[in-house]
Image (cartoon, helix red, strand yellow):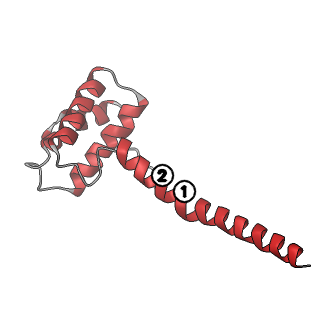
Amino acid sequence: MNRKGGLITGVILAVSSAFFFIFIGFPLFNSQSGDQAGSPFDNSIQSPEAISTIANDIDSCVTSPTSDCDQEMAQVEKFCQQNKGQEQNYPFCTDSRVSIYLEHRNMAQITVNGGGS
C-alpha cells in the first residue's frame, strides 16, 4: 500500500511541476527571449542603435512597402503620438514620410479593434 501511495504522490508532483512550468516558467522564458529579438518600441528605444534601426526601417519601407511595413509604420506613428513633445529624443517622429506612407497606403483611417456595431 505504501508503494501505491508513493506512486500517486509522484504522479501528483510531476503533474503539478508540469503545470507550474507551463503557466509560470514558459511565459517568463518567452518574455526574456522576446526581449532579445525585441521590438524597437521597448524601454531601450532611446539607444542610438534602436533609433538607427527604426530610421533604416522607415527608409526600406518607403522604397518597398509591404504589409509588415504597414504595421511597423502604424506603430511608429502611434508611438510618436503617445510621446508628443519629445521629438528631439526621437528624430524619426519628425519624419514626414511616415504619415505620407500611411496616407498613401490608406492606413490613416484604419483602426484595429475599433469596435462598433
Residue 61 picture quarter: top left
Q: Looking at the image, which is closer to me, 56 or 70?
A: 56
The percent position of residue 62, horizontal first and vertical second, equals 26, 25
Helix, strand or loop status at disc 1: helix
Q: Looking at the image, which is closer to me, 38 or 18?
A: 18
Q: In this image, 81 relative to 5: left or right?
A: left
Q: Residue furthest top?
A: 63
Q: Classify the position of the N terminus by image quarter.
A: bottom right
Residue position for label 1: 26
Q: Residue at x 40, y 44 (%)?
A: 110
- Mark 1 residue crowding within 10 angstroms, few (<14) / some (14–19) / many (20+): few
Q: In this image, 10 relative to 117: left or right?
A: right
Residue 116 appears in view: no
The percent position of residue 86, horizontal first and vertical second, equals 12, 54
Residue 85 appears in view: yes
Q: Residue at x 27, y 24 (%)?
A: 60
Spatial distance from mark 2 to mark 1, Cα to Cα?
6 Å
Name which residue type carries label 1.
Answer: Phe
Q: In this image, 31 relative to 52: left or right?
A: right
Above/below status of 60 relative to 114:
above
2 and 1 marks in contact (CB < 8 Å): yes
Residue position for label 2: 30
Above/below status of 78 relative to 27:
above
Q: Residue furthest front?
A: 2
Above/below status of 48 relative to 32:
above
Residue 63 picture quarter: top left
Q: Residue at x 18, y 40 (%)?
A: 51
Residue 3 picture quarter: bottom right
Name which residue type carries label 2.
Answer: Asn
The percent position of residue 26, horizontal first and vertical second, equals 54, 56
Above/below status of 44 relative to 53:
below
- Mark 2 residue crowding within 10 angstroms, few (<14) / some (14–19) / many (20+): few
